[in-house]
Image: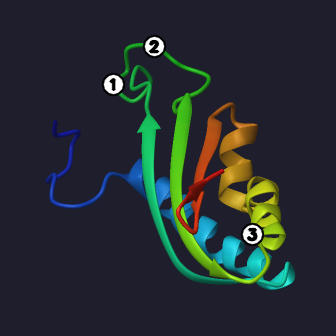
Amino acid sequence: MLRGGTDEGSMPVEYVFMGLVGCTHVIANNLAAANGITLTSMDIKIDVTMDSHGTRLINPIDVPFPSCILHITAEFDGPREGAIKVTEMLRDHCAVSKMLQESGTIVTENWMLNGIAI
């Protein structure tokens, strides 16, 4: 659906979630190093629910993105305890995740570490 543009590029709100994926990747790697592990690969998929009532001018809304689920598949070298710490700490250190959480979005991280779901 066109909303006043050419529909040839990303919508502005898509950049928020590109930022979330990028922040997740960078902060996860920083946390990995701080916890004695190395992330050797990482794949991040994202599912976002959007309430478009506000952008379609139907009515104002408080939480435009009620939920966001990150599916993070990572391989690592090092002690598993360090990898588990990364999964526990990420949501508190990624600035974009914190911004979304504080705005009312439920941000869920589903982790798969070395083939094992967390």
User: Which label's residue is closer to the chain start, 3 or 2?
Assistant: 2
Say what secondary structure mark 1 lies in: loop
Along the horizontal axis of the image, is 116 left or right of 49?
Answer: right
| Residue 52 sits in quarter | top left
Instruction: Indicate which label's residue lies in the foreground, 1 or 3.
Output: 3
Q: Residues within 10 Å of mark 1 (few under 14, many from 20)?
A: few
User: Which label's residue is closer to the chain start, 1 or 3?
Assistant: 1
Tell me the distance, in whole angstroms, between the alpha carbons under discs 1 and 3.
Answer: 42 Å
Find out whether the residues at labels 1 and 3 contact each other: C-beta distance under 8 Å: no
Find out whether the residues at labels 3 and 2 contact each other: C-beta distance under 8 Å: no
Near-viewer residue (10 or 67): 67
Q: Give the residue at x 59% y 27%.
A: 63
Say what secondary structure mark 3 lies in: helix
Q: Give the residue at x 77% y 66%.
A: 86
Along the horizontal axis of the image, is 79 left or right of 7?
Answer: right
Q: Residues within 10 Å of mark 3 (few under 14, many from 20)?
A: many
Say what secondary structure mark 2 lies in: loop
Q: Give the residue at x 63% y 41%.
A: 107
Which residue carries the number 3 mark? 83
Along the horizontal axis of the image, is 86 left or right of 100?
Answer: right
Which residue carries the number 1 mark? 56
Q: Give me the disc on residue 59.
A: 2
Residue 39 location (% of width, % of height): 63, 81
Tell me the distance, in whole angstroms, between the alpha carbons under discs 2 and 1.
Answer: 8 Å
Q: Is residue 39 above or below residue 106?
A: below
Tell me the distance, in whole angstroms, between the alpha carbons under discs 3 and 2.
Answer: 43 Å
Along the horizontal axis of the image, is 34 left or right of 65?
Answer: right
Colour pattern: rainbow
